[in-house]
Image (tube, helix red, strand yellow):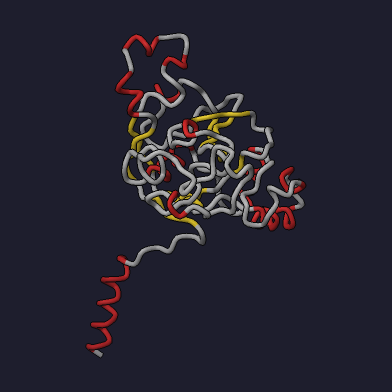
Amino acid sequence: MIQILFILLSLSMVSPCFATESPKDMVLIPAGKSQMGSRSSLLELKPHDLFNTDRHTLGPENPAHEVYLDAFYIDIFEVTNKRYKDFVTATGAKKPQGWVKPDFNEDLQPVVGISWKEAVSYCKWSDKRLPTEAEWEKAGRGKRPVKYPWGDTPPDSEKLNYNEEKMKTTPVGSYENGKSDYGIYDLSGNVSEWVHDWHYPEYYLFSPKKNPQGPEKGHYRIIRGGNWRNNADDVDLTYRNATAPNMRNDTVGFRCAKNAS
């Protein structure tokens, strides 16, 4: 009897240490502070530039700032055609435009030719959501303020699909050398990715320091990560772009996120 009680007591003492298993094909990004935006641009910033009517004096990814994010999960891979087919079959959703094009309709290629709302619908169906751009950037930069998922060395064809070298998307996870510190693939190149946030050029000047969600309204939604057509200047982790939410083309896909609690 004493031995049984001792075993039960031991289990009760160690069980809180067991890590919660991440959802399939997702990785846990721990809570904490991280840098967002371009540090080099901040160093070059002149005080009077803050009041310049031309926002591009600063650039859309300036100034660099620190944010605190609660823990969250994010997909290791961009959503594939195969996974999106399951969604279409189950819900009767509209088929993506990319499926009629041989260069973009293979099962393991990222789904393209869908709008922001369609990406949101898929994530909800999967019991997930789109990541915020702050979450997306933290997932890419990992534990250090690097320029690219793999570090600060310039892009090359061993790390990502970009600069029209392939002239199409590649199967997700094709670039082992291009993954982030957290083991996430294709955050640079392949397809740009829809995120949750509305776009507002000056948002970085006044965004919340904790769990920023983007402006409450806008005309364009943020896309992140560059794509197979972009050059080296547009595939770094701070680069921000935006487009109309109903836009569908061959360069934009998405991945999902999920609250950790």
Which of the pair 29/229 is nearer the observer?
229
Residue most toward the bottom?
1
Q: Is residue 74 above or below residue 211?
A: below
Horizontally, residue 125 falls left or right of residue 130, namely right
Which of the pair 9/227 is nearer the observer?
227
Report the number of discs: 0
Q: Is residue 178 above or below residue 218?
A: below
Which of the pair 227/32 is nearer the observer?
227
Residue 162, image x, y percentages: 54, 40
Q: Is residue 107 above or below residue 67?
A: below
Residue 237, image x, y percentages: 43, 37
Residue at the spot x=74%, y=57% of the render? Answer: 89
- Can residue 96 be seen here? The reply is yes
Which of the pair 169/46 is nearer the observer?
169
Residue 227, image x, y percentages: 56, 39
Horizontally, residue 72 falls left or right of residue 220, namely left
Residue at the spot x=43%, y=64% of the render? Answer: 21
Image quadrant containing the N terminus: bottom left
Residue 242, image x, y percentages: 57, 29
Horizontally, residue 183 falls left or right of residue 230, namely left
Residue at the spot x=51%, y=23% of the render? Answer: 200
- Can residue 261 be seen here? The reply is no
